[in-house]
Image (cartoon, rainbow, N blue to C red):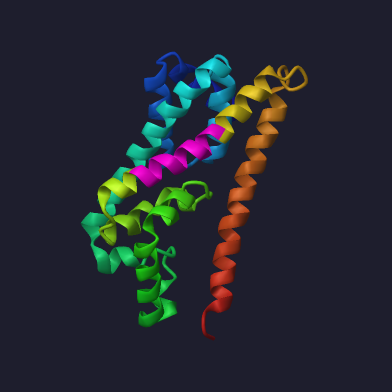
Amino acid sequence: MSSLLSTVIALFATMGPLGLAFCALIEKLIPIVPSSGLLIMLGRFAVADAAALPGAVVATTVGSTLGSLAWYGLGRWVGAERGARLLTFGSLPSLGHERRERLHRAYLRRRFWITFLSQTMPVVRVYIAVPAGALAVPLTGFVVATFAGAVVWNTVFLATGVILRNNPVAGGHGDIVTTIVVALLAAEAIIAGGIRLLRRRREPV
C-alpha cells in the first residue's frame, strides 16, 4: 500500500498546488488513509524544500477546508434533529435530552475554539463539520476556524515529511516513513476505540 500511495502522491505532485489541494480534499471526504500519514508522505515526495512548505500548507489547507464545507453542507441538509445526534458520533441518545441540549449550547457558545481545536484531533477533524452544519453554526466563523486549525495540523505533518526526506539517516529508508504512517494509523484507531469505550462505560446499564 505504501508504494501505491507513494505513486499516487508522486502523480499529484506533478500538478503542483492544485494536486496537493486535491489530495487534501479527497482525504477529508474519504478518510481511508490517516491525514497525518498522508501529509507526511506529501511533505516527503511533493514538497521540494522548506521554501516550498508555506505554499504546500496553503494548498492542502484549502483542500481540507473545502472537504469540511462539503460535510457542513450535509449537516445543513440533514437538519438539527438528526445532525445533532452526530455531535458525539451517535451516542447522544443515551445522554438524555437535557444533557444533549447542554452540549449543543456549549458548542454554540464556543464554536470557534471547538471547531479550531477539532481540526487538530484525529477522526474528529473530519466529522465535526456535520453537527456544525446541523446546528447552523455561522458559515464565516466555521470556515475561518476550520482553516486556522487545518493550518496548524498540516504544517506539523508536512514539515515532518520534509525533515524526514532531508534527514541523512531517514532519507534513503522508505521503511522508516512507512513505519511512521502505520503507527499514526494505529494511534488514530486506538483513539477512536478509546472514545467509544469510554462512552459505553458511561451509558446506563
Residue 111 part of the magenta segment: no
Residue most extreme to the right: 169
- The relative height of residue 121 versus residue 97 in the rendered view (above or below) is above
Quadrant containing the C terminus is: bottom right
Q: Position of residue 24 (x, y in %)?
A: 43, 33
Q: Residue at x 54, y 16 (%)?
A: 51
Which region shows up in magenta? 144-155
Residue shown at 61%/62% (left/top)?
194
For the stretch drawn in magenta, the main secondary structure is helix
Of 131 and 3, the residue lying toward us? 131
**Left or right: 159 in relation to 129:** right
Q: Position of residue 41 (x, y in %)?
A: 57, 27
Quadrant in the picture for residue 70: top left
Quadrant of the rendered image containing residue 176? top right
The one nearer the camera, 35 or 121, is 121
Q: Residue at x 47, y 47 (%)?
A: 119
Can the viewer see residue 173?
A: yes
Establish if 60 lies above or below 104. above
Q: Residue furthest bottom?
A: 205
Which residue is nearer to you in this view: 59 or 36? 59
Q: Position of residue 88 (x, y in %)?
A: 44, 65
> Quick check: 176 left or right of 35?
right
